[in-house]
Image: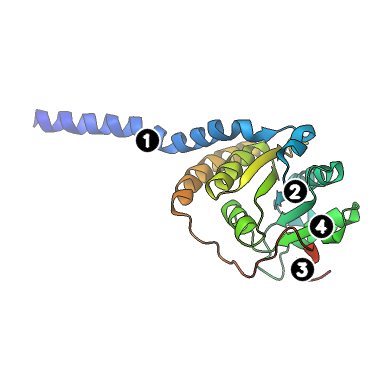
Amino acid sequence: MKKHRKIRVISLVALLLLLPLACFGPSAYIVRHEKSNILPAEDAAAAEAECAIIFGAGVRNGKPTPMLRDRLLTGISLYQSGAVKKLIMSGDHGRTEYDEVNVMKAFAVERGVPDTDVFMDHAGFSTYETLYRAGAVFEAEKVILVTQTYHLYRALYIAEKLGLSAKGVSADLADYRGQFKRDLREIIARDKDFFTCMLKPKPTYLGEKIPVSGDGNLTNDRF
C-alpha cells in the first residue's frame, strides 16, 4: 500500500509540475520567437511588404472600437508613408447585421486612401483564418501585420507557419480597458494556435482568388 501511495504522490507532483509548462510553454515560446519581428513604424518600409493586414477588433454603432481605430490609424499611416501600397481589412462579416470590414474600409477611404487600394476580407473570423486567406485568396507573400503588441506575437507566428513573410507594427496608441483579461485570454489563444498551426486546417471559407496586387473594389459588396 505504501508503495502505491508513493507512486500516486510522485505522479501528482509530476502532473503539477508539467501543468504550468503545458499552459505557458507554447505561449512563452511564441513571444520569444517572434519578438524580433516587431518593427517600429518608421522602419516598416525595410520589410518591402506588398500590403498591411489590419485585424478587426469590433465595431459599435457603425464606428470602430478604440482598439480598432488605433489599428486603422496605424495601417493608414503605413500606407501614407509608402511602407505599403495596399491595405487588407480583415474582420467578421458573417452576418448581415454585423459588419466590421465595410466600417474599416470607409474609415480608411474617408482619410484619403484610394478605395482601389483597400481590400476587404469578409471572412476573417479568426487570426488564423485571416492569415490563411491572406495567402490563399489574396495571394499575398510579404506582409506587415497591424494590431496591438499582445496580439502581434501570435499573428506573426501563424503567418510564419502558413508560409508568409511577415513583420509586425504595433498599434498600441493608448492604454485599453480590460487589457489584463485580454492578456490572459491571449495565453490560451497562443496555446491553441500553436497546435492549430501543426494541423493547418482550411478556413471556414476560401472562394475565388482576388490578388492584392489588383483592385480592392473587387471585394466590395456596398461601395
Label ID, residue 117: 4
| Percent position of residue 182, x then y | 61, 41
Query: Circle 3: is it few (<14), some (14-19), or many (20+) Cα within 10 Å?
Result: some
Q: CA distance from mark 4 to mark 1?
A: 47 Å
Instruction: Determine contact: label 4, label 2, CB under 8 Å.
Output: no
Q: Secondary structure at mark 1?
A: helix
Label ID, residue 218: 3
Q: Secondary structure at mark 4?
A: helix
Question: At 10% from the left edge and 28% from the top edge, which residue is drawn?
Answer: 2
Q: CA distance from mark 2 to mark 3?
A: 23 Å
Viewer-nearest of discs 4 and 1 = 4
Viewer-nearest of discs 3 and 1 = 3
Which residue is under mark 1? 19
Q: Nearer the viewer, residue 29 or 141?
A: 141
Q: Quadrant of the C terminus?
A: bottom right
Question: At 74% from the left edge and 45% from the top edge, which residue is drawn?
Answer: 67
Which residue is under mark 2? 68
